[in-house]
Image (cartoon, rainbow, N blue to C red):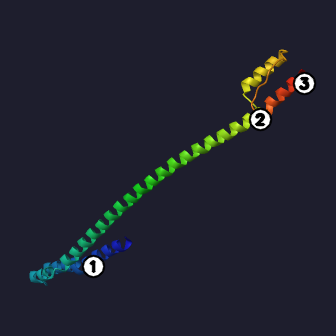
Amino acid sequence: MRNDINKLERLAERWLKDAAKPEIAARREMNQSSTSMKDVQALIEAATGKNIMDALRQEWTDFINIEQGLLIQRQNNSLAQTATNEISIIVGTLLAICLGVVAMLYTTKKLLNQVGGEPTEIADITQRLAAGDLDILLTGAGKPTGIYAAVQEMIKVFK
């Protein structure tokens, strides 16, 4: 891109040096009557300025077309990156939710193992025991653990 801008600047400088300044100088000289209108006309007819301006216009058009193409390409790249980012966010969110559920289930299992049973059932048993009821039947599948096992042991000791 910088090369294109430099090329445009060089063409503009060339136009000034080879066409504009000589034609202006010739007209000024003509006004002082040493140069004729034919001399000025010959400079104009040589089309030096026109050719340089045509080249300058063509370079400018090429530059604009290249930049428009690059803008479209960058826009397409941006849209593709946006889609990728959206997918990453969705997948990351779903993964975080799944990990959260797994962590919750693991923690719940560990807590229930420490408690050994339903907390409301254990609270009911301990309230009945505190009230003096030693005829409490404890039913549970498998080996009791945690607080539930301690409550069973406490009932055996009090009986």
Q: Is residue 59 above or below residue 107?
A: below
Q: Quarter of the image holding residue 156? A: top right
Q: Is residue 89 above or below residue 23?
A: above
Pointer 3 or 2: first along the chain: 2
Residue bearing mark 2: 114
User: Residue flagged by tag 1: what amino acid is it?
Assistant: Arg
Q: Residue at x 35, y 64 (%)?
A: 70
Pointer 2 or 1: first along the chain: 1
Which of discs 2 and 1 lies nearer the camera? The answer is 2
Q: Is residue 99 left or right of residue 46?
A: right
Q: Is residue 124 above or below residue 77?
A: above
Q: Quarter of the image holding residue 124? A: top right
Query: Tag on residue 58?
Result: none
User: Which element carries disc 2, helix, strand or loop?
Assistant: helix
Q: Position of residue 22 (x, y in %)?
A: 21, 80
Q: In whole angstroms, how far apart are the C-alphas of marks 2 and 1?
A: 90 Å
User: Residue flagged by tag 2: what amino acid is it?
Assistant: Gln
Q: Nearer the viewer, residue 132 or 104?
A: 132
User: Which element carries disc 3, helix, strand or loop?
Assistant: helix
Which of discs 3 and 2 lies nearer the camera? The answer is 3
Residue bearing mark 3: 157
Query: Tag on residue 14?
Result: 1
Q: In whole angstroms, how far apart are the C-alphas of marks 3 and 2?
A: 21 Å
Q: Is residue 101 visible?
A: yes
Q: Is residue 67 above or below residue 158?
A: below
Q: In whole angstroms, how far apart are the C-alphas of marks 1 and 3?
A: 111 Å
